[in-house]
Image (cartoon, helix red, strand yellow):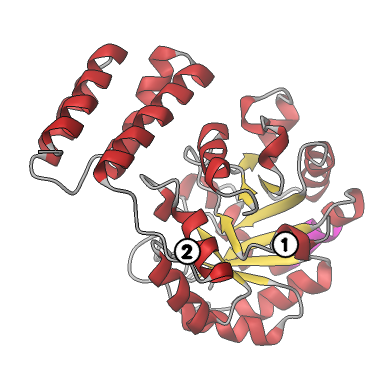
Amino acid sequence: MQVKDLISSRVSLAPMAGITDYVLRSLIREHSKSCLLTTEMISSEALTQVKNTDIVKRDENHSPISYQLSGHKPKMMADSAEYLQRFADMIDINMGCPVNKVVKGTDGAALMRNPDLAQEIVRTVKSQISIPLSVKFRLGYTMDELNYVEYGQKMQEAGADFITIHGRTRSQMYGGKADWKRIAELKRNVDIPVFANGDVVSIETAVQCLEESQADGVAVGRGVLGDVTLISRIEKYLNKGEYLPPPTLEQKILDMKKHLMREIEFRGEDVGIKFVRKFYPYYVNGFQGASRCRGELVMLDNLKDIISLLDSIMLANKA
């Protein structure tokens, strides 16, 4: 498929390490048949060591799906991309991850300080794959290094087919507010599609982001936490003008239970329960006593007890 087909819904799932795993991607796909899914960041170094890993798992209906790679060694990145294209509809190169352990290894957002190397990576990967190639980066490394326009142009020149840009610098991490208006300058200066990312947490913010950024679409990250319907609801509004309200607490608890059971099926009960704990604050909120309930949930390691507590939360808030 060409890029225009992969992004036709105008909404994508942004990659989040330890979050956008096979299970979450599957849950989002149940609501949205056409959004562009993106995997967690896959280390090219790790993939060189172990090919048969759960991180690459997908279902037939996961298309359109982009597999995101991190690294800084052009040939290794290209070899990894060549391997991943058997699963992927598009390869995405991570040039925006702000986490210390990633940038210290010259990966992620560190590449924004080395555009020549970034170009070499894009050119080398592009030469070894037969599917579209995208890049994801930020406004710059710091507010004094806002090189996103020139950087985007260099990525296009090197062969990138699509850009996703997070409206923050690396130094901002995930703090402050995403600057959607700056993205419009990038959009004016490249010829390939651009998706805007950062702080899209509702239909309303998606619309505002598109208005300010003039982007071709939005990439939704943290907004899907606790709301696997968000991407589909944004799609329906953008493409059909249909407004669907956010899920009720009851629906969020039902989705939480489904998420939990799917992770247990995928990872085993012990690991699955521990993995899902990070999602409790997003599903279990918005009612009196929510903090106490989350505290209790985190302490539970027995599936029956967790389900019982979730059921009691639903029952108590129906009254």
Q: Quadrant of the N terminus?
A: bottom right
Q: Amino acid at mark 2?
A: Arg
Q: Secondary structure at mark 2?
A: loop
Q: How far across and down, in percent of the image, does residue 283 sit?
A: 30, 41
Q: Amino acid at mark 1?
A: Ala
**Dot 2 corresponds to which residue?**
170
Q: Is 119 inside the magenta-drawn segment?
A: yes
User: Horizontal placement of 274 versus 265: left or right?
Assistant: left
Q: How far across and down, in percent of the image, does residue 255 sit?
A: 38, 36
Q: Secondary structure at mark 1?
A: helix
Whether residue 307 is situated above or below residue 173 in the rendered picture: above
Instruction: Point out which mark residue 42 bears.
Output: none
Q: How far across and down, in percent of the image, does residue 73 sit?
A: 75, 48
Is any atom of residue 302 visible in this view?
Answer: no
Secondary structure predominantly adopted by residues drawn in magenta:
helix
Of residue 8 and residue 95, the one placed in the foreground of this image is 8
Question: In the rendered picture of this protein, how many numbered marks are placed on residues?
Answer: 2
Residue drawn at x 85%, y 52% as measured from the top left: 131
User: Horizontal placement of 58 versus 242: left or right?
Assistant: right
Of residue 104 and residue 98, the one placed in the foreground of this image is 98
**Dot 1 corresponds to which residue?**
118
Q: How far across and down, in percent of the image, does residue 267 sit?
A: 50, 18
Of residue 121 and residue 193, the one placed in the foreground of this image is 193
Give neighbour class at mark 1: few <14, some 14-19, many 20+ (Cα, 10 Å): many
Residue drawn at x 35%, y 28% as measured from the top left: 257
Whether residue 117 is situated above or below residue 72 in the rendered picture: below
The residue segment tinted magenta is: 116-123
Residue drawn at x 86%, y 56% as measured from the top left: 126
Q: CA distance from mark 2 to mark 1?
A: 16 Å
